[in-house]
Image: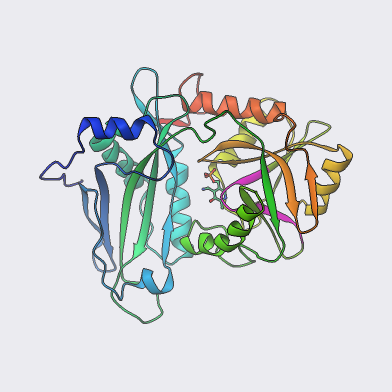
Amino acid sequence: SFRLPGSSVRKADAEREAILASPGFGNAFTDHMIAIQWSVDKGWYDAEVRPYGPLQLDPAASVLHYGQEIFEGIKAYRHADGSVWTFRPESNGARLQRSARRLALPELPVDAFVESLRQLIAADGDWVPSAPETSLYIRPFMIADEAFLGVRSAQHASYYVIASPAGPYFAKGVAPVSIWLSTEYARAGKGGTGAAKCGGNYAASLLPQKIAYAQGCSQVLFLDNDGYIEELGGMNVFFVQRDGTLVTPALSGSILEGITRESIIRLARDRGITVEERRMHVEDWKNGVASGEITEVFACGTAAVVTPIGELKGEGFAVGDLSAPAGELTMSLRQELTDIQYGRRPDPHGWMVKL
Ligand code: PMP
């Protein structure tokens, strides 16, 4: 059971409405947050809804030194009748548990994860925007905050949930993006933390991402050490082949198991499309686009749902045509998924959960 805040700290309606009118992404935060404590001795305790605000951390807190941190990303969507829904939250809860296991953090029960989202929406439901393709982006995360400098898993951790209203990812309509191939830097390796959603993976991706931006690209493509395609810095990747088959890199142990990825696979198979999860070499991407064997490439993830990839660039090469329109299958899968998320069509797999 969650303790509720004593004094309300709500922003003025006018201020909230001004933020919701043009939220951007990750700039502004709702009035409240969730906090749950954990210790070796007590297990999970002290669940509360509290005013959004700074954390007080001991300077020796292990997260600050050894990066023992994990997080999730999930959205709340407002439907036409005003109700607020989220998408497959048990999957995010289960992934947070897998991340916790890899980072030697405690596993929050999936029920408590889903309840933490409910509690935040109960307090801050009026922060869920209602304009088309907007949402409330919810960021659950967990840090090791024992004050101890020895290198071992911490005996105290805290779980928090914060939320930030999000505008439409593509303000001017969905447009194909350019992707930068990083051959110098890897994001993850065999046996590493690539399959976990931990801050360190993203820290490792920031330098190559800076290089990508400088090259006019919006995301980085990471390969494994043998040149096989893994994923983008924050999205999974799919290829449509001339014969209609959909291909996506298999879960190698070093890529993040995207919930959008799994949902796309399901929706495609429902349509009778063959989906192959297998290894794919970056040379097959380059050659396939050049020969016409690959007809569409897209990326997918919670933030941008489905994003057409128009071009792959790297040192000394570029393939694809950025000015070509987004692929037909790419756009129809995007439409189907967003229609389910925004309650515009039936939800055949029971993915939507009312908050
Ligand atoms: N890969 C990485 C590295 C990511 O950060 C994300 C975003 N969570 C994804 C893939 C897509 O995952 P999901 O569809 O669950 O958002």
Report if residue 153 is visible in the image. no
Residue 165 on image: x %, y %: 37, 37
Magenta region: which residues? 227-237
Determine the residue positioned at 48% across, 51% down: 95
**Residue farthest toward the right in the current orientation of the protein:** 291
| Residue 5 as seen in the image, left or right of residue 229 | left
Residue at x 29%, y 74% (from the top left corner): 59
- 153, above or below 180, in the image: below
Report whether 25 appears left or right of 170.
left
State the quadrant of the C terminus.
top left
Which of the pair 345/27 is nearer the observer?
A: 27
Q: Is residue 91 magenta?
A: no
x, y percent for residue 103: 46, 65
* Furthest residue toward bottom: 150
Residue at 72% x, 65% y is: 225
Whether residue 58 sits left or right of residue 204 in the image: it is left
301, 184: nearer the viewer = 184
Q: Does the magenta segment cover residue 232?
A: yes
One can see residue 168 in this view: yes
Between residues 192 and 79, which one lies in front from this camera angle?
Answer: 79
| Image-quadrant location for residue 316 | bottom right
Q: For residue 298, which quarter of the picture?
A: top right
Q: Taking 161 as reference, is 313 left or right?
A: right
Q: Identify whether 196 is placed above or below 258.
A: below
Colouring method of the image: rainbow
* Residue at (47% x, 58% y) in the render: 99
